Image: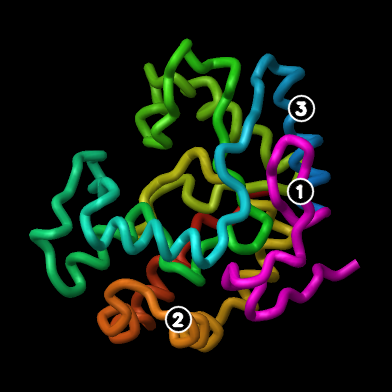
Amino acid sequence: MSPRRLTAEQLTGQDQSHLIQLATGEQLQAEAANSWQKLCQRAAADGIELAAVSSFRSYQRQALIWQQKCLGARPVMDEHQQAVDVQLLTGWNKLEAILLYSALPGASRHHWGTELDVIDRAALPSGYQPQLLPSEYQSGGVFERLGQWLPQHVSELGFFLPYQHYLGGVAAEPWHLSYQPLAANCSELLTLEVLQHALLRQPIAEQSLVLEHLPVIYQRFVQTICEPTA
């Protein structure tokens, strides 16, 4: 069966009729949800309590995050996980700093119902709030074991890590899972024109600047990912 062809509104997070909601709260396309539940069972067999801290994210939600980062009301981090004062930045430098960890509204893979940001709930110390920083998944981090487990096992159920390594666009996100059989189709359908139309329909913070640089943003921060491995 070929993947369902999403509409432009579904691809850009303006319509979520393509999703189902699991009892545990995740909003995903049905096929991705089924594989996600199986992946959780597979992880549990290895003593990992796989849990999603984010799945579907709407255009409006992404636009709010974007606006807060543009205004300096939400932390912006650099590649060394150090805080950046975006109010001291202008033009492309400001956009580049925000795009390192935050997708442009309309361009987030989380709009598709194929993506999850994951933690190991069993590894959480009492009172600890996950930050979703690479250091948490590296040697000595609270999710070190999960960071080792994911690359070894997620492909067994159709997932991959689109931001496993930094490739000059989005920073490394060892927590970000993508359900490849559906995400590949969504990536093809999300053209530059579809993204531009979404932004023109629902303008965001720094709209003029974003539209000026949209072709570069699309190529570097939307299309550039780590490809699935066998």
Check disc 1 and report the residue beneath it. Answer: 21
**Main secondary-structure element of the magenta-colored stretch:** loop
Q: Using residue 77 as the reference point, say whether residue 182 is left or right of it.
A: right
Residue 37 lies in quadrant:
top right
Where does the image place residue 70, in percent across and percent down from the top left? 26, 62
| Rendered position, 24 above or below 49 | below
Image-based side of 63 in relation to 88, left or right: right
Q: Secondary structure at mark 1?
A: strand
Residue 45 falls in image quadrant = top right
Q: Is residue 32 left or right of residue 176?
A: right
Q: Which residue is mark 3?
A: 42
Residue corresponding to mark 2: 199
Q: Nearer the viewer, residue 50 or 200?
A: 200
Alpha carbon distance from label 2 to label 1: 27 Å
Please name the amino acid that badge 2 sits on.
Leu
N-term mark: 2 or 3: 3
Q: Residues within 10 Å of mark 1 (few under 14, many from 20)?
A: few
- Mark 2 to mark 3 CA distance (whole Å): 39 Å
Q: Indicate the amino acid at tag 1.
A: Gln
Residue visible at 39% across and 57% down? 65
Q: Which residues are magenta?
A: 1-30
Mark 3 neighbour density, 10 Å: few (under 14) some (14–19) many (20 or more): some
Number of numbered discs on residues: 3
